Image (cartoon, rainbow, N blue to C red):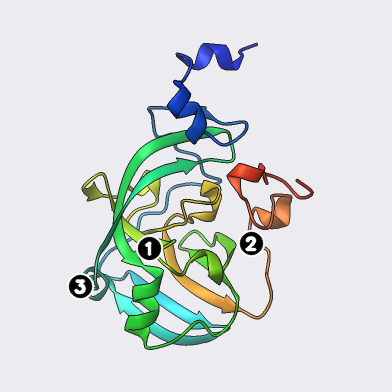
Amino acid sequence: MTTRGFMGRRPSEEARARLPPGQYLTEDFPVLQFGPTPRIDLDTWRFTIRDGARPVKSWSWAEFEALPRTTWSGDIHCVTTWSKFDTVWEGVSFDDLLAEAGITAPTEFLLAEGYDDYTTNVPVADLIGGKAMVATRYAGEPISPDHGGPARLLVPHLYFWKSAKWVKGLRFTQTDTAGFWELRGYHMYGDPWREQRFTGD
């Protein structure tokens, strides 16, 4: 049996203030996923915004890389209880994606969709106003496949399963539609500070 006491030095007072309930601080970047890592050809990669089944806007990799860039630095929190501080990501903000597509959000909800057929639901209110991006770089380097590259959603104020790896698009939905883990008992929202790990939390 191991206990949290064996996971390293006790965090400082400042670090404890940044850790949501039930989380521990790690210097590593654990790799957690359900299935194998997909290998994605950038020559055929596309990112598509859909309103239901209807495509609204789609970009190739070269077109996506030419979009306005945003950098975000801060802490991330995994539902499996690790947190990592001061991470740095670069990508295209959700606000800029909507602007480049020439639309306002048509519904209050969407599903992020991955190349591995993974989905996760996120309220639009948690993406606008600089709260989220589609990230293509981490710590100044292209995101590695194990961490969701070439592109992943980044919604850092929610548990990290909401930051879908290998993302290929965002699909607006009329209702708050459960994604892969939500259908299997994870919380529909996933706020780390309220410990919303599972249904009923």
Q: CA distance from mark 3 to mark 1?
A: 13 Å
Q: Amino acid at mark 2?
A: Gly
Picture layout, residue 192 above or below residue 105? above
Q: Residue at x 34, y 53 (%)?
A: 149
For disc 2, the marked residue is: 179
**Which of the labelled discs sits on residue 27, or is there none?**
none
Q: Amino acid at mark 3?
A: Ala
Specify the quadrant of the image occupied by residue 92. bottom left
Q: Upstream in the sequence, badge 3 or badge 1?
A: 3
Q: Amino acid at mark 1?
A: Val
Q: Secondary structure at mark 2?
A: loop
For disc 1, the marked residue is: 134
* Residue found at the very far right of the displayed protein: 200
Q: CA distance from mark 1 to mark 2?
A: 18 Å
| Residue neighbourhood size for the residue with mark 1, other residues' Cα within 10 Å, grouped as few (<14), some (14–19), many (≥20) | many
Q: Position of residue 69 (x, y in %)?
A: 24, 65
Q: Is residue 87 found left or right of 199 in the rendered image?
A: left
Residues at circles 3 and 1 in contact by the CB criterion of under 8 Å: no
Q: Is residue 67 found left or right of 84 in the rendered image?
A: left
For disc 3, the marked residue is: 66
- The C terminus: image quadrant: top right
In the image, which is nearer the foreground, mark 3 or mark 2? Answer: 3
Picture layout, residue 79 above or below residue 169? above
| Residue neighbourhood size for the residue with mark 3, other residues' Cα within 10 Å, grouped as few (<14), some (14–19), many (≥20) | few
Q: Is residue 151 found left or right of 141 in the rendered image?
A: right
Specify the quadrant of the image occupied by residue 46. bottom left
Q: Position of residue 111 (x, y in %)?
A: 56, 69
Q: Secondary structure at mark 1?
A: strand
Q: Upstream in the sequence, badge 3 or badge 2?
A: 3
Residues at circles 3 and 2 in contact by the CB criterion of under 8 Å: no
Q: Position of residue 56 (x, y in %)?
A: 44, 87
